[in-house]
Amino acid sequence: MNEFTSSFWSYYIGVITLVSIIGCAVFLKAQSVRRIETKEGGTATTGHVWDETLTEYHHPLPRWWSWLFYLTVAFALLYLVLYPGLGSWKGVLGWTQVGQLKAEDERMEAKVGPMYEKFAAQPIPELAKNAAAMATAQRLFLNHCAQCHASDGGGSRGFPNLTDNDWLWGGTPEAIQTTITNGRMGVMPPWGPVLGEQGVKDVAHYVMSLSGMPADSIRVARGKPLFATNCVACHGPEGKGNPALGAPNLTDKTWLYGAGEPVIIETITKGRNNQMPAHKNILSPQKIHLLAAYVYSLSHNK
Ligand code: HEC
Ligand code: HEC
């Protein structure tokens, strides 16, 4: 209610609610008058007649039904005294949705907190061998990571495979933990405007030759110096990549965007911007520690 500058609406709502509830009670009372006698001593009818002779007696509501109704009225009034519901009235119990959520969170934390603390005290390679810890970690992975990296961590186009021990940003326990905590931004600049269509094709064939893919030897020869000038800063003199920049190794058979001439040309021409989101605001350090161990286990527990 604090978005209203005056308390008018609060009273407005409060008065309407109370008048409705009390109105219900008054109406009920009015309908419960005892049996109406006619002057002749018979029972009055409502005056409705069906099928020529069928008339309806004017009986009051059954007592049990009336009392049930009075009870609901009393319940409503009691409820509105105890809980927020009447305008900005907070209720004498001081209950709030936020308070309830917080209390539930705290209960949960008290229950599972010690377990995460115990896991957090273990070094990652050791934790990765703890089957009970990995079962918990797998549930975290399915909740927070599987939408991008697939439920088995196998990844897909643009989303790295986490099971192959081939890393963009490094596969040490510390590097994995840093990746999950702070996120990563993989930036491959676009080379189309710099090298032109033929230049891109030449350097692409040189890249293909690095991993033993079939390539046009003339283009490879023309592409080699282009690679030395433009690409080694990030991908290294031998094309083996650089984990400090997230630049992939181009000499192996692992491709983030898939193998094949067309997709390599597309990457070089247009560049790529790829982001691993930071999780430090979503997950506690203990959970990140456990997830780092899980990712580590995917390529080490075989
Ligand atoms: C929104 C999609 C998305 C989510 C969610 C996500 N990731 Fe990633 N992750 C990526 C992308 C994209 C990359 C690659 C970044 C790049 O190209 O440099 C990546 C990279 C990584 C890497 C580095 C891989 C390497 O080869 O160095 C690790 C480790 C990783 N993610 C683990 C996780 C874990 C654990 C979670 C869950 C807590 C997670 N990711 C959630 C998209 C995601
Ligand atoms: C500023 C650093 C930088 C430079 C310079 C650079 N790259 Fe990259 N390159 C990257 C990064 C980072 C990625 C990974 C992008 C991602 O994470 O999505 C990448 C990805 C690639 C890929 C895709 C690999 C795969 O697994 O799918 C190819 C191919 C590639 N680069 C070729 C080149 C060529 C050829 C040049 C020179 C013309 C070049 N790069 C120059 C940083 C660079």
Image: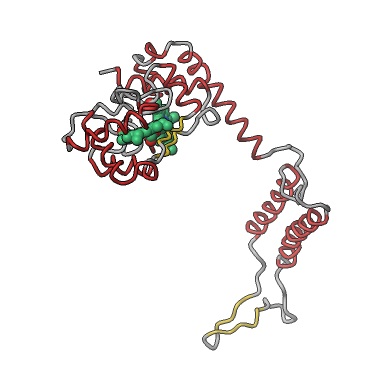
Residue depicted at 65% across the width and 79% down the height: 46
Residue 118 picture location, percent across and down: 48, 13
The foreground one among 190 and 3 is: 190
- Single out the residue that lies furthest toward the bottom: 52
The foreground one among 73 and 104 is: 104
In the figure, is residue 68 to the left or right of 93? left
Residue 240 is drawn in which quadrant? top left
Q: Is residue 202 above or below residue 56?
A: above
Q: In which quarter of the image is the C terminus?
A: top left
In the figure, is residue 197 to the left or right of 176? left
Residue 101 picture location, percent across and down: 60, 35
Q: Is residue 129 above or below residue 284?
A: above
Residue 77 picture location, percent across and down: 74, 50
Residue depicted at 39% across the width and 45% down the height: 193
Residue depicted at 73% across the width and 37% down the height: 93
Can see residue 176?
Answer: yes
Please state the quadrant of the image where ligand 2 appears.
Answer: top left
Residue depicted at 54% across the width and 88% down the height: 52
Residue 196 is drawn in which quadrant? top left
Can see residue 144?
Answer: no
